[in-house]
Image (cartoon, grey):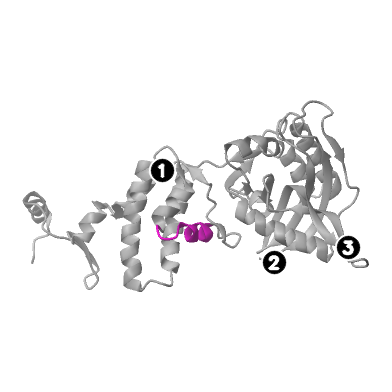
């Protein structure tokens, strides 16, 4: 995915772990944007790639202009009422204020990156950490200590799809929310940016069904007939999965039911989608029963005629489609149903 950098900068937030209170965070702001050079390009490409793998939650920005200041500053920046550096300094201050109340949070480098990719405009905010490493002095060939950016542990990051945000296409926000303890430590970051989880049960359930259907259809190891068979079995597994996890179902559990032989393949399919074609799925959500029931039921209308029957009826050929007559056929109807239809049928001339 090509990354076209618009502008970027970094501010340092200095805080010792296990400290809290006013003055526990010192902000060292950068006064200008970072130069658009190969170093920045490589960093940003790696960061965007790592973020795509790590982001596991979708949402929206808070709408209370008094309590949620980050969306206000972002809106002013996008509308060209505020320049990039002042916007990022406001945002860094918001992060610092929330960090002061987090006992376990440590400092880092707040990277603000505006970039374009796949015809979408993005603002990515990430807290970067440094890790010790080793380098080689080219002149003396001796080893030297170095500090490198640690992208492997990207725990505090959020990205706004500005293109979707401006037209209120939800969800337009993604962010990283780890396991319970990790989520608690990084909560200050999400609060600072007013990240609100997108918890639409129907959206998530519909998206999973679409993703599962797409995944099976994209499998190159199956013939057309095998895909049809796998789709039928997979739908049964998914129904049982949702019905057994009515309050909350992890995406990893869903993956194990979509593709038991290699769940990771389904997760890759879900995560590695071009922007604008993604499924916008959280790592866990509450299944929407009225939606997943359709895995076992077929419903439809033709004018005033409503049809509803189990998938099992189709598989047992009690209900079938006659392509020659372009008609749905109900086999072995009850005597009462036959009499009712015959009573109301037009009399032949």
Give SS at disc 3: loop
Q: Which of marks 1 and 3 is nearer the N terminus?
A: 3
- Measured along the vertical axis of the image, is residue 14 above or below residue 83? above
Please give the residue where the numbered disc 3 appears in the rendered image. 142
- Measured along the vertical axis of the image, is residue 111 above or below residue 345? above
Q: Is residue 288 left or right of residue 126?
A: left
What is the number of the mark on residue 288? Answer: 1
Image quarter of residue 245:
top left
Q: Which of marks 2 and 3 is nearer the N terminus?
A: 2
- Where residue 79 appears, x then y in whole percent? 77, 49
Label 1 to label 2, Cα distance in Å? 36 Å
Q: What stretch is highlighted in magenta?
A: 260-270
- Where residue 213 appears, x then y in whole percent? 41, 60
- Depth check, front residue: 208 or 128: 128
Q: Is the magenta stretch mostly helix, strand or loop?
A: helix
- Measured along the vertical axis of the image, is residue 81 above or below residue 333? above
């Amino acid at each position: 995915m090509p990354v076209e950098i618009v502008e970027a900068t970094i501010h340092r937030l200095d805080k010792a772990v296990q400290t809290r209170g006013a003055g526990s965070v010192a902000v060292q702001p950068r006064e200008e944007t970072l130069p658009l050079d190969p170093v920045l390009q490589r960093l940003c490409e790696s960061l965007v790639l790592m973020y795509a793998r790590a982001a596991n939650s979708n949402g929206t920005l808070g709408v209370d202009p008094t309590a949620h200041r980050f969306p206000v500053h972002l809106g002013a920046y996008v509308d060209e009422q505020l320049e990039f550096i002042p916007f990022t300094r406001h945002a860094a201050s918001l992060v610092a204020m929330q960090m002061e109340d987090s006992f376990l949070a440590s400092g880092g480098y707040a990277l603000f990156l505006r970039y374009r990719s796949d015809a979408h405009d993005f603002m990515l905010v990430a807290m970067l950490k440094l890790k010790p490493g080793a380098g080689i002095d080219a002149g003396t060939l001796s080893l030297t200590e170095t500090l490198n950016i640690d992208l492997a542990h990207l725990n505090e990051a959020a990205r706004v799809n500005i293109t979707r945000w401006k037209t209120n296409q939800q969800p337009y926000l993604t962010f990283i929310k780890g396991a319970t303890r990790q989520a608690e430590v990084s909560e200050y970051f999400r609060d600072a940016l007013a990240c609100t989880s997108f918890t639409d049960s129907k959206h998530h359930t519909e998206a999973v069904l679409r993703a599962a259907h797409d995944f099976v259809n994209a499998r190159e190891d199956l013939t057309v007939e095998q895909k049809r068979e796998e789709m039928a079995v997979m739908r049964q597994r998914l129904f049982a999965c949702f019905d057994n996890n009515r309050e909350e179902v992890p995406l990893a559990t869903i993956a194990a039911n979509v593709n038991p032989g290699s769940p990771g393949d389904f997760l890759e399919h879900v995560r590695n989608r071009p922007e604008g074609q993604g499924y916008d799925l959280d790592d866990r959500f509450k299944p929407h029963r009225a939606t997943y029931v359709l895995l076992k039921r077929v419903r439809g209308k033709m004018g005033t005629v409503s049809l509803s029957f189990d998938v099992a009826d189709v598989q047992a050929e009690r209900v079938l489609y006659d392509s020659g007559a372009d008609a749905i056929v109900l086999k072995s109807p009850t005597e009462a149903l036959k009499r009712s239809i015959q009573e109301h049928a037009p009399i032949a001339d």
